[in-house]
């Protein structure tokens, strides 16, 4: 049994990780800043196994004490929103301080940081730049740093499908940002959580990057048509030029009601697929599942 700290553990990916890792008997600590339903997090394991606690900042003395005693630290904490500060502050500087604390932990066996496909590419995304800098900070300071770069993660309750499906159910016209030809490589949440379990159980050492992408590469246009077919509904995909929508999103994201942010809009500008630059599911002996069939199962159930 190991002591595992999971930042962002109350989110979609975090809950799946907690369910899987708790079955292995690990003690899991879930630090959080925004309000969460602590009781639901505790119920993901047996009594006393999962401990959520609120911290004020990365400099919180109680948090530092917990981090100094942990064997595994998993960081899922990220954001697409700059309302609470720049990405340099909320992503990179947070990670920089966290890594500095972990660097003095003699018990630490692994630091697992969730990044994303393509963050290493030259682009105009300040968020991706902050995430990529965080990757390098981990590699430079913690000897067993594992970077997880997943594709768009789908599964019951994922944010991606939760936002799309209501639109497909209610509207005949579906907005398609850009020309719809941009491709992505969705991955099933159970495959991602299994990969993390294997990384921990096999005590993988060294600095590693795992690109966790599903077996299907598909354009947004074809994926949207797949959703329509799964729903057995006729839908008209309406291209929306990015040059038109960007200024509107720029204004809307300053309010609490924006459906997406400017950073999320950048996902429609370039392919989000594996570059095969390091390791993948294959290195962990995992055959990723068919995400189109999983999407159909989610919709039909």
Image (cartoon, rainbow, N blue to C red):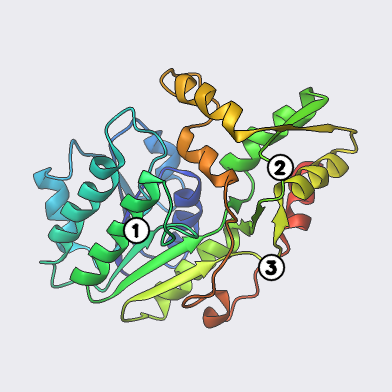
User: Which numbered disc, 2 or 1, marks the residue that appears first in the sequence?
Assistant: 1
Viewer-nearest residue: 12 or 44 = 12
For residue 249, side relative to residue 233 (left or right): left
For residue 15, side relative to residue 35 (left or right): right
Q: CB under 8 Å between callouts 2 and 3?
A: no
| Residue 79 position within the rendered picture, expressed as x and y whole percent measured from the top left | 39, 41
Vertical comparison of 82 with 93: above or below: above
The residue indicated by pointer 2 is 179
- Residue at 32% across / 81% down in the picture? 205
Distance Cα–Cα, label 2 vs label 3: 23 Å
The residue indicated by pointer 3 is 215
In the image, farthest residue toward the front: 243
Distance Cα–Cα, label 3 vs label 1: 25 Å
Tell me the element at label 2.
loop
Marking on residue 132: 1
Q: CB under 8 Å between callouts 3 and 1?
A: no
| Residue 220 position within the rendered picture, expressed as x and y whole percent measured from the top left | 71, 47
Marking on residue 104: none
How many numbered marks appear?
3
The reply to whether residue 301 is in sight is no
User: Which numbered disc, 3 or 1, marks the residue that appears first in the sequence?
Assistant: 1
The reply to whether residue 263 is in sight is yes
The quadrant of the rendering that contains the C terminus is top right
């Amino acid at each position: 049994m190991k002591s595992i700290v999971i930042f962002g553990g109350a989110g979609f990916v975090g809950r799946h990780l907690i369910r899987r890792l708790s079955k292995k008997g690990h003690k899991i600590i879930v630090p959080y800043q925004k309000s969460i339903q602590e009781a639901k997090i505790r119920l993901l394991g047996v009594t006393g196994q999962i401990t959520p606690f609120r911290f004020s900042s990365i400099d919180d003395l109680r948090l530092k004490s917990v981090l100094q005693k942990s064997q595994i630290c998993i960081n899922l904490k990220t954001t697409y929103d700059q309302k609470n500060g720049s990405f340099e502050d909320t992503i990179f500087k947070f990670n920089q301080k966290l890594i500095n604390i972990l660097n003095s932990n003699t018990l630490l066996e692994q630091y697992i940081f969730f990044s994303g496909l393509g963050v290493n590419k030259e682009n105009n995304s300040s968020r991706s730049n902050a995430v990529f800098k965080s990757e390098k900070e981990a590699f430079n300071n913690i000897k067993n740093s594992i970077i997880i770069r997943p594709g768009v993660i789908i599964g019951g309750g994922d944010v991606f499908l939760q936002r799309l499906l209501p639109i497909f159910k209610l509207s005949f016209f579906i907005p398609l940002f850009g020309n719809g030809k941009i491709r992505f490589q969705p991955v099933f949440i159970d495959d991602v959580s299994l990969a993390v379990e294997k990384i921990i159980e096999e005590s993988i050492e060294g600095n590693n990057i795992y690109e966790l992408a599903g077996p299907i590469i598909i354009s947004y246009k074809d994926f949207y048509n797949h959703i329509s077919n799964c729903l057995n509904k006729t839908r008209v995909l309406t291209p929306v030029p990015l040059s038109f929508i960007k200024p509107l999103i720029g204004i809307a994201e300053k309010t609490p009601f924006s459906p997406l942010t400017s950073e999320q809009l950048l996902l429609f500008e370039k392919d989000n697929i594996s570059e095969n630059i390091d390791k993948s599911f294959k290195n962990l002996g995992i055959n990723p599942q068919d995400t189109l069939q999983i999407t159909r199962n989610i919709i039909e159930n």
